[in-house]
Image (cartoon, rainbow, N blue to C red):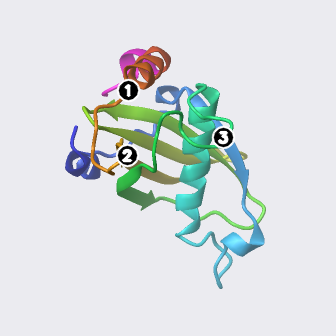
Amino acid sequence: MTHEAAYRRVPTTDRNAYAFQSEVRVRLSETDAVGIVFFGSYSAYMDVGRMDYLNHLGLQSSDGRVKGLLPGAVVGATLDFRSPAHYNDVLLVHTRIAALGRTSYSFDFLLTQKRSREVAALGTLSLVWLDESFRPMPLPDEFRRVVTEFEGPALGD
């Protein structure tokens, strides 16, 4: 799947499609002047989900980087807001890798209120694996294997 296709794909709201989740508590600094979570804060929440997911699968090295990954490039990001979140709300960041391409991979995120289960936002991130010259390179076999085993048949839905 190209990163252009990831822009057109809408993540599912079916919680069963996500085999991993993280939890974040909204801090005051993440809200705006009217008391709701500032839209830019959702990117940070998605990044928490992404890094927790990779760590959960053992794909993160001790220095916090993805194993074998030189600085990767986020080539696409989407956010669709459904309901407001406020200071001190606890959000669940449901995370999955939804697609593996030749040189890229895409995450889906479903952010829900822990207490009410209401959907706060949906998002995607598409990344490209880079070599030492910052050129796209094929995804490593080990990365592909670990993700495919974890995601199972849901990968590519």
User: In this orientation, does residue 107 appear?
Assistant: yes
Residue 26 in the image: above or below residue 148: below
Badge 3 or badge 2: first in the primary sequence: 3
Label 3 and label 2: CA atoms lie apart by 31 Å
Q: Quadrant of the N terminus?
A: top left
User: For the magenta stretch, what is the residue range?
Assistant: 151-157
- Check whether the beta carbons of the residues at disc 3 and disc 2 lie within 8 A of each other: no
Look at the image and say whether residue 3 sits in the magenta stretch: no
Q: Which residue is mark 3?
A: 22
Residue 132 in picture, x, y percent from top left? 37, 46
Badge 2 or badge 1: first in the primary sequence: 2
Residue 69 in picture, x, y percent from top left? 46, 40
Label 3: state its secondary structure. Answer: strand
Label 1 and label 3: CA atoms lie apart by 25 Å
* Kind of residue sitting beneath label 2: Glu
> Mark 3: few, some, or many residues within 10 Å (few <14, many ≥20)?
some
* Kind of residue sitting beneath label 1: Pro
Q: Residue at x 48, y 58 (%)?
A: 82
Left of 153 or right of it: where is 4?
left
Label 2: state its secondary structure. Answer: loop
Left of 151 or right of it: where is 111?
right
Q: Quadrant of residue 102?
A: top left
Residue 156 in picture, x, y percent from top left? 31, 27
The numbered dot on residue 132 is 2
- Check whether the beta carbons of the residues at disc 1 and disc 3 lie within 8 A of each other: no
Q: Which residue is mark 1?
A: 140
* Count of labels in the image: 3
Left of 103 or right of it: where is 14?
right
Q: Residue at x 41, y 59 (%)?
A: 80
